[in-house]
Image (spheres, rainbow, N blue to C red):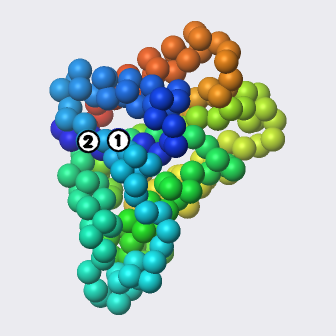
Amino acid sequence: MNVLAVFAHPVRDAFMGQVLDSFVVGAEAAGHHVEIADLYREGFEPVMRPEDYAAFEARPMPDDVLREQARVERADAVALIYPIFWWGFPAILKGWFDRVWCMGWAWDSPETPTSILPGRKWVVMCSSGLTERTYDKYGYREPFLHLLRVGTLGYCGVDDLEVRTFFEVDRDGDAQLKERYLAEARELGALELPGSF
């Protein structure tokens, strides 16, 4: 099966780059074909421009948007791999959603998503420099999951979603914890569910 890994971290050799690599290893070991969309290294333009409103005017979308949509359309499963910035996506990934997930492709109306996004397995692997205890102390978990499950992916009909948050990865700390996270990423790459991968 085809798997698209959307990687949105400004530093390729940061820990989340290792997460991407581990995910790819797991996916390929399970016999899947992996395409990587490395948004920073590929120079994806996240800022919306006037031509990005073409979907609202029944005109063709810009070529770079169509290329990203085609990547998703080729995929049976999609993994989003990124650090959490200010309780949400890095700007480049937010811009990817803003520009690529347009009306007529990802959604038709607030009540009616199109059929292109449902039917795929979606995996989110994100990192936080916080401890899990601090994350829960300040109530970060629910707003973050609501953004994913309702406000973004769920809004466009995605209902097969697995989310993993890797805590304390920005610290020079527990090597065993990081190894556990990398093992989880490999397992997620190999994950097979009926009707998905």
What number is the disc on residue 5? 1
Q: Position of residue 197 (x, y in %)?
A: 25, 37
Name the mark on residue 194. none
In the image, residue 89 sits, relative to residue 137, either above or below, namely: below
Q: Choose between 101 and 163: the one closer to the eye.
A: 101
Which amino acid, by three-letter code, is at mark 2? Glu
> Does residue 152 appear to the left or right of 38 in the view shown?
right
Q: Is residue 188 visible?
A: no
Question: Residue 32's quadrant in the figure?
Answer: top left
Q: Upstream in the sequence, badge 2 or badge 1?
A: 1
Against 5, is 44 above or below?
below
Q: CA distance from mark 2 to mark 1?
A: 6 Å
Q: Quadrant of residue 101?
A: bottom left
Depth check, front residue: 35 or 116: 35
At 47% from the left and 45% from the top, the residue drawn is 8
| Left or right, residue 74 beside residue 107 | left
Residue positioned most to the top: 176
**Quadrant of the rendering where the N terminus is positioned:** top left
Residue at image mark 2? 35
Left or right: where 85 falls relative to 110: right
Q: Nearer the viewer, residue 119 or 131?
A: 131
Q: Position of residue 106 (x, y in %)?
A: 36, 67
Tell me: 87 left or right of 20.
right
- Label 1 residue SS: strand
Circles 2 and 1: CB atoms closer than 8 Å: yes
Query: For the residue marked with disc 1, what is the amino acid?
Result: Ala
User: Farthest residue toward the bottom?
Assistant: 57
- The residue positioned 64% from the left and 35% from the top of the image is 128
